[in-house]
Image: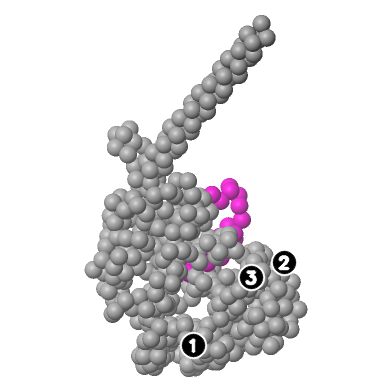
Amino acid sequence: MHFSKKCSVFKVVLSALLIVALLQLLYLSFLSKFHGKQQRYKYSELFGSKKASQQGEKNPRREHFRYSLSTGGIFDGSGQYRVYKNLIKSDFLTNQKPGADPRSHHLALATHTTINNLHHLNSLLERWQNHLSVAIFANNQDVKFATAFIYALSIFCPQIQALVDFHLVCHSGEMASFPEQDREHFAGLEEKGCPGVFAKLEFHRDKYKNYAIGANVSYPNNLLRNVARSGTDAAYILVIDIDMIPSANLHHQFVTLLMRKEPAADEVLVLPAFEIRHTRKMPASKAELVQLYQVGEVRPFYDELCPRCQAPTNYSQWVNLPSKSSGPLEMAYTINWVDPWEPFYVGARSVPLYNENFRQYGFNRISQACELHIAGYRFSVVSNAFVVHKGFKVQGEFHNRKDEENRKNRLLFRSFKESLKAKYPHSPRRC
C-alpha cells in the first residue's frame, strides 16, 4: 500500500515534468517563429518583398531612397564630383506640431565626413538633438559602404529618421546604387538596431588618416560644406566638422534670441572653438569648459598647429566674461577679421558659399571668412556658447602630404583674393 502511494506520486511528478518540458518546447518554437517573422518583416522593410510589391505596399523612405539613387545625382560645377542631395530626408518638418513656432527651424547644423568618421554622428546628435544635414564623401569601395550605412541608419535609428538629412558625394565616374546585393551589411541588425549600426561603423574608423583617402583622391571639403548647407531649409546654419560638439543649449539659446531680436543681415555670430584632451568628457556648459580650460585639459582650437588661426577670438577676454547658459545668446564683442582667422559661426543661409576649388588641407575655411570680411560682414563673438573638437590637434597625427597641400592652397588663396576684388569692386576691405 505504501509502495503504491509512492508510485502514484512519482507518476504525477513525472507527468508534471513532461508537461512543463512540452510547454517549454512550444514556447521556444513560438519565439523562433515570432523572431523569424520579425526578421522577414525587417528585411521586407529594408528591401521590399515581391508579395508586398504585388499588393502595392510601399515604404516611403525606401522608395525615396531608391528614386534618389536612380536619378544618378548631379555633377558639381567642376564636373569632377557626383552629388546625391537628400538621399535620406528627415521627418523634421513633417513632425512639427500645427501652430508650432516656425523659429524652431531657424537653426540647423551642417557637417561633412567620410565613412572613416561617420561614427561621430552618434555623439553629435546626442548633444544637438535638432535638425542636422550631413554630407558624406565616398571613394571607390566606400561608395557601396556609405550607401548601405546611410540606408541602415535611416531604417534602424528613430532619432536619425526624425532629424537627419543625408547627402552623398563621390567622383563623377562612380555611381551609387540601392544596397540590394549587399545584405551582409545588415545581418544581425534586426536584433541590435541603431547601436548595431554604429558598432559596424566603428570598424571603419581610423581606416586612414584625415585627407589620406587614396592616391590622387582629393577630399572636397568645401563642396561638402556647401552641399550640407544647401540641403537644409533653415534660415540660419552652423557649419562644423563632424568631430566637433556644440555647447548643450545652443539651439534653445538661439531661438530665444530670435524672439527678442534677429541678428543683423551683415552679422555672423562667432562661437569660440576649443579642443579637449581625448580622455575628457565633453563639457556641456561654459562653467564646465572654463574649469577644464584653467587646468589645461581644454585649449584653443589649433593651439599647437596654428595659434594665429584662432587668436583673434581673444580667449583670455572670453573666459572671463560672465554669462548665463540658460538665457539667449549674448553678443559680447565684435572683431574685425584678420588673416588667418577661421572662426566657426552661426550665419544666415544668404552668407556666401565656400569656394569649392579648395580641397584637401589648408585655406578652405580661411578663404570663406576672408570673403565674408570683404563682403562687409561683422563678426560678433557670443559669450555663452562654444564648440569643442574631440582631442588635441598635434603635429604628428597628420597625413604625409599636409605641407605640400598647404603650399598649393596658399597659392590658390592668393589668386582667390585677387578674384574678390573683382567680385566686390566697391569694398574698401582687403584680406
- Which label lies toward us, 1 or 2? 1
Q: Viewer-proximal residue, 193 or 419?
A: 193
- Pointer 2: residues within 10 angstroms few (<14), some, or many (20+)? some
**Which type of secondary structure does the marked residue at label 1 adopt?**
helix
Q: Is residue 374 above or below residue 121?
A: below
User: Badge 3 is on which residue?
Assistant: 281
Q: Viewer-proximal residue, 294 or 90?
A: 294
| Image location (x, y in percent) of residue 75 | 29, 68
Tell me what residue is drawn at x 60 percent, y 63 percent. 127
- Residue 84 in the magenta stretch? The answer is no
Tell me what residue is drawn at x 64 percent, y 80 percent. 298
**Which type of secondary structure does the marked residue at label 2 adopt?**
loop
| Image location (x, y in percent) of residue 348 | 52, 72
Tell me if 249 is positioned left or right of 355 in this view: right
Quarter of the picture holding the N terminus:
top right
Q: Are marks 1 and 2 in contact (CB under 8 Å)?
A: no
Residue 58 appears in which quarter of the rendering?
top left
| Image location (x, y in percent) of residue 329 | 67, 72
Indicate which disc, 1 or 2, sits on the residue closer to the N terminus: 2
**Which type of secondary structure does the marked residue at label 3 adopt?**
loop
Disc marking residue 395 = 1
- Amino acid type for the residue under numbered disc 3: Lys
Q: Viewer-proximal residue, 424 or 214?
A: 214
Tell me what residue is drawn at x 60 percent, y 78 percent. 277
Residue 413 appears in which quarter of the rendering?
bottom left
- Residue 99 in the magenta stretch? The answer is yes
Tell me what residue is drawn at x 23 percent, y 68 percent. 173
User: Badge 2 is on which residue?
Assistant: 326
- Amino acid type for the residue under numbered disc 1: Gln
In this picture, which residue range is highlighted in magenta?
95-112
Q: CA distance from mark 1 to mark 2?
A: 37 Å
- Amino acid type for the residue under numbered disc 2: Ser
